[in-house]
Amino acid sequence: MPEPAGATLYRVELPMAVGFDHPAKRRSASDSLLLRLEVDGLTGLGECAPRAYVTGETSDSVSAQLLGLPLDAVFARLRSSEPAALLARLRATGVAGTFGVRGGNNLLCLLETALLDLLGHRLGLDGDRLVTAEDAPATRPAMLPVSQVLDLSLDVEEFLDTRGPFHFVKVKAADDIRRDVRTVTAIRSRLGDQVPVMVDANMSWSADEAAGHLAALSDAGTDLVEEPLAKGSWAELARLRGRTAVGIMLDESVCTPEDARRALESGACDAFNVRVAKNGGPATAARVIGLARGAGLGFQIGVQVAEVGPLINAGRALAFAHPDALSVEAGQSDRFFPEMVVSPRPAVDRSANTIAPAPGPGFGLDLTARAAAWAVAHRSEGDPVWRPVAASGSRTPRIPA
């Protein structure tokens, strides 16, 4: 008889050494859920980072959905299915189509990253091979350049002095368009016109003011603006796009493949910001990339602020599997977290602002002893109840009802 399979849920709220500010949220700690699956001696690590302003989900709501899932059926499917066929099915239909799981994008991402990691271990495949697609470029680069993000906590001069070399610059918009214009002007003065510059409005502009903002930013040298209007403003986005030379990238508006198709049908944008957690997992995110590529649109491999482990390497796997991205955001876990809950620590070569492929198999990470402090619940195969985990230290586990 095989050992019973099991699952452990962690809620990781690591304090950040430096904060991150943008129009939608000020963040000073992580808020990620980790899921560790154990089946027949193999493990898979998953992560999601729910953001209510993006998908309407929270860590509490995702935890509650997870605790109600029939995981024994997932364990049984993992044991009974040929691994390569199961991987192909996951790539094509995601967790919802493969396992019949219903829930928000972050629940699907939590499961999908864990399942892909486990299958990577079973098949001996590295992360980029788990999330590739038939229409993706065949050549995998040895390194990828990553973008640098100027948030509202950092002065533009300090940013320019300390965060180079620059391959792509993303500016988090302020509540004053004059400040944003000055920021882009300063960047262009220092970097010239060879480095793309994008301003991320995070849904903060009205339709009435957006055209004027885009004109001013265009004159300053902005190439792209991300999510300028309220989420899903398809008709207004299409009209805005027809009135400006600045490209429009959509992020919060494009959470599902159905959203992506709606954006394409509406003529609402020039590019998608693809993020693993927001889009429901790396395989599902790859399908969104395929829609963009098929329509001749660009795409960015983005991140959630303060990812803590599997999401980081899943995003990097996606980037190396689809190296024709306009830009890649590698995140700032090296700056945010002096200590992490995973090993090996995801690295960025800050001397060149580049990343290398994550080591496999799977997404190439194990939990460290530090992770135990964030464990909240465990479930064993055959037992339908999630049992609280007594976390070390003074922290009390929080399990939604």
Image (cartoon, rainbow, N blue to C red):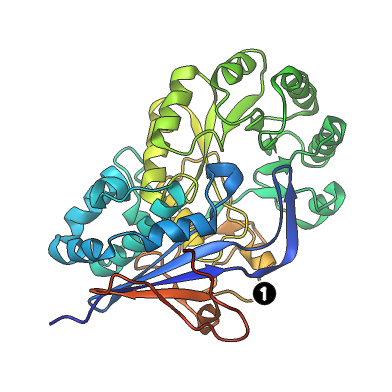
Q: Nearer the viewer, residue 391 or 148?
A: 391
Residue 4 quadrant: bottom left
Give me the residue at 49% from left, 68% from top.
399
Residue 76 quadrant: bottom left
The answer to whether one can see residue 357 in this image is: no
User: Please, which residue is most extreme toward the front here?
Assistant: 401
Amino acid type for the residue under numbered disc 1: Pro
Q: Say which quadrant the N terminus sits in.
A: bottom left
Give me the residue at 73% from left, 33% from top.
193
Residue that badge 1 annotates: 338
Give me the residue at 58% from left, 55% from top.
330
**Quick check: 261 above or below 55?**
above
Callout 1: few (<14), some (14-19), or many (20+) C-alpha neighbours within 10 Å?
A: few
Q: Position of residue 140 (x, y in %)?
A: 40, 51
The answer to whether one can see residue 109 in this image is: yes
In screen coordinates, is 301 left or right of 104? right
Secondary element at image label 1: loop
Q: Position of residue 250 (x, y in %)?
A: 56, 32
In screen coordinates, is 292 left or right of 331? left
**Quick check: 272 above or below 109?**
above
Q: Position of residue 22 (x, y in %)?
A: 73, 46
